[in-house]
Image: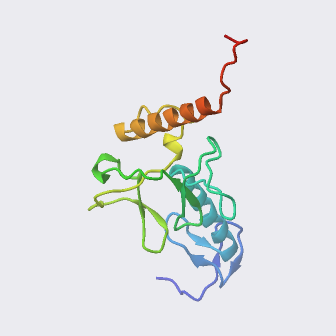
Amino acid sequence: MGDTSEPRTCRGCSTADAGVTWRGDPFGALCSTCWAGTEAGVDHQQAEAEDADAPAPPAPPLCRACGREQDRFPTGYGHWILLEPDIRPAARDVPEGRRWVVCDDGAAVNWVGASPPAYCRIAHRPVCSKSLRPEKLPRIFLAVWELNVSYERRIYAQDALPFTDEEQ
């Protein structure tokens, strides 16, 4: 092993000083500035993969696509997720990586691993009425998507003006 007091060179910006720290594989040695940028990029990629793109407070917890209010929770990596309200399917019916659990501290965690909880929550984005029909997801997603589409149709039908005698 080499001398740990030697300055390392940052893989990102080539700075060489004692403040450059080994960040583990696959990141390597990075200064604090490059590490902050890397963390933000990794967090953004995770948020995209998990549908955690909700507007942060104080903005209302509305879906940007359909405009419906959802349940909004913070994630553990600085983003916010909209979860379907009142929908709590059995976790065994939801694929790993799409099982959301709200912890005691109010943060939402995408449950991955053994021993899933009995019930979980699902993200709103894949079942939003404005998204494509979720053909490649389990039936629970298709059922919630169809429910959201029917809800939107009922809302638009209520907003329509009744026919007058002249229009018939």
**Left or right of 93 in this view: 6:** right
- Quadrant assignment for the C terminus: top right
Q: Quadrant of residue 18?
A: bottom right
Q: Nearer the viewer, residue 159 or 108?
A: 159
The residue lying at 51 percent from left, 33 percent from top is 149
| Figure colour scheme | rainbow
Q: Quadrant of residue 162?
A: top right
Residue 104 horizontal/vertical position (percent): 42, 73
Asked if residue 160 is positioned above or below residue 65 in the image, the reply reads: above
Asked if residue 124 is positioned above or below residue 154 in the image, the reply reads: below
Residue 31 horizontal/vertical position (percent): 66, 75
The residue lying at 51 percent from left, 47 percent from top is 124
Q: Nearer the viewer, residue 160 or 89?
A: 160
Residue 163 horizontal/vertical position (percent): 67, 19
Asked if residue 167 is positioned above or below residue 115 in the image, the reply reads: above
**Left or right of 129 in this view: 12:** right
Q: Nearer the viewer, residue 147 or 124?
A: 147
**Left or right of 89 in this view: 16:** right
Residue 77 horizontal/vertical position (percent): 55, 66
Total number of numbered labels? 0
Q: Quadrant of residue 13?
A: bottom right
Residue pushed farthest bottom? 5
